[in-house]
Image (tube, rainbow, N blue to C red):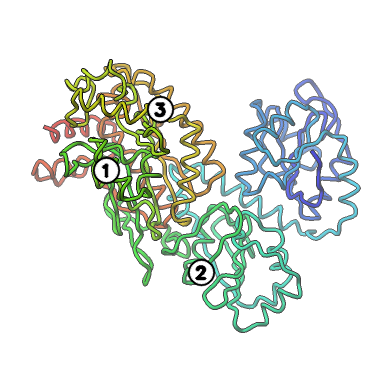
Amino acid sequence: MEVQFDKIKLVIWDLDDTFWRGTLSEGGVEEIASNVALVKRLTDIGIVNSICSKNDEEPTVERLKEIGIEEYFVFKSIDWTPKGQRIQKIITDMGLRDVNVLFLDDNPVNLNEAAHYNPGLMIAEPQIIEALTRWAQEQTPADLSHKRLKQYKVLEEKMRSKGEFSNNLDFLYSTKTVVKIHRDCSKEFERIYELIHRTNQLNYTKKRISKEELETILNDSSYDCGYVTVKDRFGDYGIVGFFAVKEGRAEHLLFSCRAIGQGVEQWVYSTLGCPELKVEGAVITQLVKGPAPKWINMEDAQESGQDGKSEAVGAEGMRPIKILFKGACDLAIVTSYMIFKGEVIEEFTYLGQLRKNEVEHHNHSVNYLALPFLSDEQKQTLVDECIFNDPAIFSTHLYDNDLDMIVLSTLSETNLGVYKKRGTDIKIAFGEWTGDLTNPEVWDKLISGEQYPYMNKFTKEYLQEFAQKYEFLGPITPQEYIQNLEQLLVKTSPKAHICLILGSEIQYEKESLPVYFHRAEEHKRLNAAVRKFAENNPRISLLEITPFIEGQHSFSNNINHFERSIYFKMSQRLNQIIAEHTGLKFSQVNPIKRYLKKLGAKYTTKINRNAWYYPMVAKLFHKLADK
């Protein structure tokens, strides 16, 4: 891979036989003075340095201190694990792109592994150091005060602190972030020009203009121009953003990677009144026409009510947040523990009005991506020929332009079978895929109800006719689901953040239905594909079920059904995800109080959810309430 020195923002160094001579774990090492000088020179010209080394951390850091260079490195990763994912984490934590990072290592295996996990990463063996040194010497030292290094030191401290919090929202409230907009842009002309040409991940318009064009904009009174500064309890980040708005349209809106993850870009966009914005190219964070994040410019670190409830309140003059929940029983139970202030739309399993059957399959991606867009004639055909369909299956709010959040369950993707109408491209997903409606060997089970019919009244005559008109394709593959997600991102509003609920990767050992026998493995394959896809799609967040499962007692009657304490934990995590992407934290309902209220009991004693006895008490009340 060609190394382009002028694109480098970060150099990640291997140590043994790269930065210094020898192997630290096998004895003494000898410093290479020219490499030490290069690190210092790179810092002077504004390029930051990090380390990814296979060594024991304590003696390695001690040796770096002896050389007098330890303080020049940030986000050091020193342990014995493979390097590919560690480098990925360094780049992510620093808010950089792999295309702006050079990794130096004497081992080709490490280099290739790093490139596998970071496709745009520049990699090179130590032989390139001489050329890099010559290039660095030719550059004008633009950061002799090491401002950029100090800012990443602040970010490093922040990331360490973040790890002490159980969720990101609580951490954000603790940062005491202060964002200010300044209008004296001419004073900071050079810094603004630098931002316009250096920013990528949070540059929404990506317009690279000359200094003359920038000067014209700043002197034009028809533009509202401003630069953005940020500081928090960790330090001062200086100027991190710039905007230029003309006649209600953002001609420039961009932020430094140092602002990633703090909600700064959403705060500025909301404060400006959410001007019209045409986003060019990929950005790491989508903006929504909603209220500004509540953790920014707050004197009190967190708004909390009694029992840890945080109220969801929008900014004055802003419309309420609009969220769509689309899924089956799992999602319905999760949302029952949350109290929303805003417009909430629930598309859960329902009873069809035409045939009084159970309609759950409208939440499968094959169906919600295609059925709403069929012609009236095609829709009527699917109702007439597929008795499991209901006219309402073609209606959804999934494609509303004003959605801020979409929450989808993936559980039906591994459960339902897909059918294709012969001679057409029309597909329909329905029923457990092990119960193929076109297979005569399954018909008796469907008619008797041994194979769950979803309250449909199947007959042999109907199934024979169905088999003549439709062919069975089986369940969709993980690759097909990823293709469906790609379509979903295109068809839905670009400002709608999507949260996907991923199925359990722990098998329920008492499964009675064949369709669930290997479901954990099927979930693993689907989840792995979704996680990989989500890595490069900032519009997608994931809610994992598996971390909440403590053992077989966590399940109810199959791998997709759980004890209510699991759903409550899922609701807490979902609350965090929604808050991170809308700025609003909703009230959380204590499940014990909810069910006591359902029983009509008077309850005044406060029960601590963190107490050792809480799970047992909750389980008891759940059983009582369900009777």
Amino acid under disc 2: Glu
Q: Which mark is residue 473?
A: 3
Position of the N terminus by quadrant? top right
- The amino acid type, in three-letter code, at marker 3 is Leu
Q: Name the residue under label 1.
A: 348
Q: Would you place residue 73 above or below residue 544 in this image?
A: below
Q: Do the residues labelled 2 and 3 touch (CB within 8 Å)?
A: no
Crowdedness of circle 2 by 10 Å Cα count: few (<14), some, many (20+)? some
Q: What residue type is labelled 1?
A: Phe
Q: From where the camera sits, is residue 614 visible?
A: yes
Decide if residue 203 is on the left or right side of residue 216: left
* Sequence-first disc among 3 and 1: 1
User: Which badge, 2 or 3, comes first in the chain's sequence?
Assistant: 2
Quadrant (top left/top right/bottom left/bottom right) for the C terminus:
top left
- Depth check: give the residue in front, 557 or 229: 557
Q: Which secondary structure lies at badge 1? A: loop
Q: Mark 2 points at which residue?
A: 276
Q: How far apart are marks 2 and 3 (CA)?
A: 44 Å
Q: Identify the residue at horizontal 71%, vertical 35% (top origin).
A: 61
Q: Which of marks 3 and 1 is in front?
A: 3
Label 1 near label 3: C-beta < 8 Å? no
Q: Which residue is drawn at 38% across and 32% down?
A: 422
Q: Position of residue 547 (x, y in %)?
A: 41, 31
User: Could you tell which of marks 2 and 1 lies nearer the N-terminus?
Assistant: 2
| Residue 424 picture quarter | top left
